[in-house]
Image (spheres, rainbow, N blue to C red):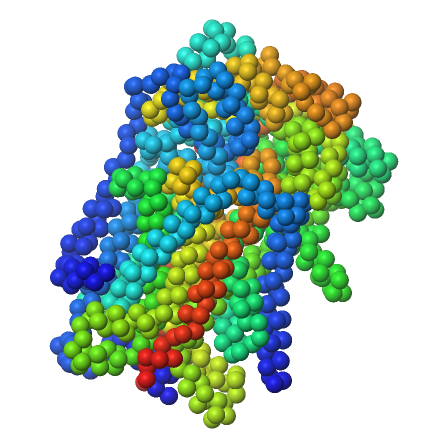
Amino acid sequence: MSTKLLLQLLVTLMIIPYLFPLVVMVQGSLAGKGLGNYEAVFAVGTVGTFFRNSVIVSASTILIVYVLTMFAAFGFSKLHIRGKEVYFWMILAALTLPEVVLLTPLFATTLSIGVYDTYWAVVLPLAALQIPFAVLLARKFIDGVPDSLFDAARVDGASIFTAFRYIVVPMTRPIAAAIVVLTLIGSWNDYLLPLVLIQDPAKQTITLLPQFFVSQFSNDQTKVLASAVITAIPEIVAYLCLQRLFERGLAAGALK
Amino acid sequence: MTSITSPKTGARRPSPAPLPDGSRKRGGRPAGLPWIMPAFVFVVGLLYYCIIETGYLSTLDWDGTSPTPTSVGLGNYSEILQDPIFWKAIWHTVVFFVVTFTVQTAIGFVFAALLHSKVKLGAVYKVLVFTPVVLAPATMAPVFRQMFAADGQLNWALDHLGLGFLSQPWLAQSSTAMPVIMFITVWQFTGLTFVLYFAAMGQIDPETLEAARTDGASNLRVLVSIVWPGVRGTTVALAMLGVIGALKTFDVPYLVTIGGPNYSTEFLGTYIYRISIPSAHVGYGAALSILLLILALLGAIAVAARANRKDGESSV
Amino acid sequence: MLGSSRIWKRRLPGAAAVFTAAALALAGCAGGGTTETTDKGSADSGSITWWGWTPDAAPAEAYIKAFNKVYPNIKVTYKKLTIDGYDAAIRPALASSVGPDVFDVAPGAANGSVEIYGVNAVDLTPAVQKALGADWKSKLAPIGVSSLTTDGKLAAFSVGSNFAGPVWVNQDLFDKYGLKPPTNYDEWKQVCAAFKTHDIKCFVQGAAQTAFNEDTLQAISNNVKPGVWAQALDKKVPWTDPTIVKALTIWKGLFDDGIMQEGALGTQQYPDANNEFMSGKAAMVMMGTWYMQYSTVDGSTAAISGAGVGDPKPFTQLPIAFPDVAGTGNVGSLYGDADFGLAVNKKSKSIAAATTFATWLGTSEAGQQAVADILNDIPALTSVQPDWNSIKLVNPAVQQPALEKLISDAGKSSEPRLATVSADLQTAIGVASTTVAARQATPEQAAATLQSTAEKIK
């Protein structure tokens, strides 16, 4: 009992530095006109459209990242590939370029493959930028699944795909949930790619919301912060929904 | 005990295979190339053009729009090696990585472990530690400048705690600006570390944990000797991401301190941005980017190699 | 999903995959050409897009509405980008064939530099000759024409200009504590000491955002000896000139003598310093003519509310001459540039309609009146004055004469502000200003470093 209390106290103390800036931020979003700041953000009239666009972009990105990552991580972890590490590091290298450097070449690429000013112009690069780390994570996770499980499956005469479907997919749920959350954050919060690669105002994403309140010689911080709160809430809700998947890991079932 | 050792057996691919290729174990493995190809083609196809293009630009002296760029060969690179700001940025990156990675890993790991044990109001803590991850640094930067200002909330809190002698203009001094940048980074990314550790801990067999407890192992010992090794894969992945991320660090220092005062919070990421966009030295910026790519890969490979060696040692 | 994995099972050879990847990559190389479109389209109908970091959405809408009264068949879509995002977005957009038809440019090294993007712009000389006649140069503010001309071509129409030099004061705060705006260094020190006892910050400067340090340094330098700063920018005198060293010494004094707010080096002009002033926490700030818009009831209320004040009450904001800190009597200098201009994209498919819009906003009475009345820019067409009857000031008796004087003084100034400062030089001046303020270098050392850096800049 006392240990439990002690742990509760410890975690509370640890959270304070995390809480402090959040309080300052929410206070800031309510300064001045109070909830009127939030009304002003909605009064811009594009919140709904931006929100829908962000959902489309994020959902497509997550789908691509999840499918490609799981295939690749399984391949890297459990299957035979000659020169495996070369492929792996080539994928990882794509993670190392700063976004500013990517912009101009990406612009040229999206233009030449004809996707400029469509959602794909944002989805494809976002997915490509998320996959390397997702593969790294998922590979490490699948490494933790004992080989014996697959050997047993093969004795049973199951095809690789069946093994993937019935062993890898269910067992990797915790890391898949983490990857979904990471990809959601990456795609939902991205600012530069939609700014540069989408021209049509009807296709802009929610990260462009604060710019209605920032201009050359004015900067309405209260409404910028209100926009940030509005932008963050869907992600927090999504995280809470996925939360249970983190816990329902392999340990619970399949191993035995 | 199987579940403690099995992740390791898995993590160690059968590299020190006693039998030559074609043996039962290895030759029996189905071909994996088709499985990795979709991701490989996708990533390489979309992003390698950027790398090749940047490599080419790095040999130019160019403002980004003029029709007549001058080729300077490797001139940009030799100039960089004598650029004091470059070396300053590298040094900052090293210190920054060591501090932020250590702190973030420790806090994220402890949080994940604490919240796996049944603390009350777990969801509230989870949301609090996770929320910073989703807040765009651009929005948070003014909040932090306000918090750490001479008359900001931090100094106010210090005054009220009787620690007034500690209060100072945090962001205006070269000596305190970097620690503030590190604090903000840790604040922002602990949520990520936490989420990944929390997921990884789901892979540890609860029966093992139970068994250890009934053996009389204390919470702390279980944590150190079972949980920590059990999430090693995640730690390695986070370390690799940390190295790459530290080298690319841009948002926080750029938005909060603009790399200042007097370059005291300059990183490669901020330097590349300043050089390539406002100053329009596209060639020099590209050369810096290529160096960043090489350093990031070397750093990540070093982390991976160290991890593999350790795996080897512990499994013997 | 099952199907796709079956396809992959056919063992696509690695080499072929790599080839596909390379082909995909190489496809990116096919960029657009750089030639000017020959078909210019219709001059009074069509649909055009305009990209800019300024003006705000609301004034832009007002401009477009006024424009459509004259040209109802040209549909203008304005896309507002942030200052930080503008360069990142415009560079690739102009390189492509689908960029904006009209885009903002500005003189100098700041965002949207005309030096950089001028190559993408159509020469507007024929258009202005048609609109204003052969003596067009006499009708436009010279600063807007010269600073937006590159390589002998008029790359953009200046919409208006901005000048720095004055200090803005919160007159109500001065009145409340029975203080007078300072006119020299000693008064300034005393005023600041007095404000401090009331827990009010005296003078705020966002010294981390170094472009604004230049404004203050230029004011001090012009006070020490007029014109030397501009000559140094022009490479006519070295940065080690005694005037500059003296200016840096006085600048350092502002920090040491409690005139500058504590922690200035960690503060940015926007939003930090601006918010301090607007929320009444600070009495003085170094801002330019763009601050005129906050003399109006609406402008002031919105800005104060934006600074986080719950119950925004407009206060009297007044421009005063920069105090005579060197004791020379040389006060009231103003230096400015064209704020922004509208350029027409060479590759636009509707060059004629785009030119119509840019010409209307930059050179027509109606367009320029719309610009003048917002009090953000001093109009480019010199014959246009703000229509004071339609503008509601907070304290007209005090403010209107002050603003009228500011506008007329600005019209006489020809000293450049940032237009001729390259990004590299700007960085170097920034380093000089912050190292001196942080006591990491003496004014002499900082000036010497600045000079040696400036010499290396091409």
- Residue C188 image point, x, y percent: 79, 36
- The quarter of the rendered structure image containing the N terminus of chain C is bottom left
**C272 on left or right of C29:** right
Q: Residue at x 46, y 30 (%)?
A: C78
Give the x, y percent position of residue C350: 36, 22
Q: Is residue B256 left or right of residue B231?
A: right
Q: Is residue C325 visible?
A: no
- x then y, percent, for residue A191: 45, 46
Q: Is C327 on the left-hand or right-hand side of C379?
A: right
- Name the residue rendered at 45%, 44% in the picture: A50
Look at the image and tell me whether residue C458 can be seen. yes
Return the residue nearer the eye: B84 or A188.
A188
Q: Number of numbered discs present?
A: 0
Q: Nearer the viewer, residue C162 or A240?
A: A240
The residue at the point 57 percent across, 45 percent down is A224
Q: Identify the image quadrant of residue C333.
A: top right
Q: Is residue C3 above or below residue C31?
A: below
Q: Is residue B188 above or below residue B290?
A: below
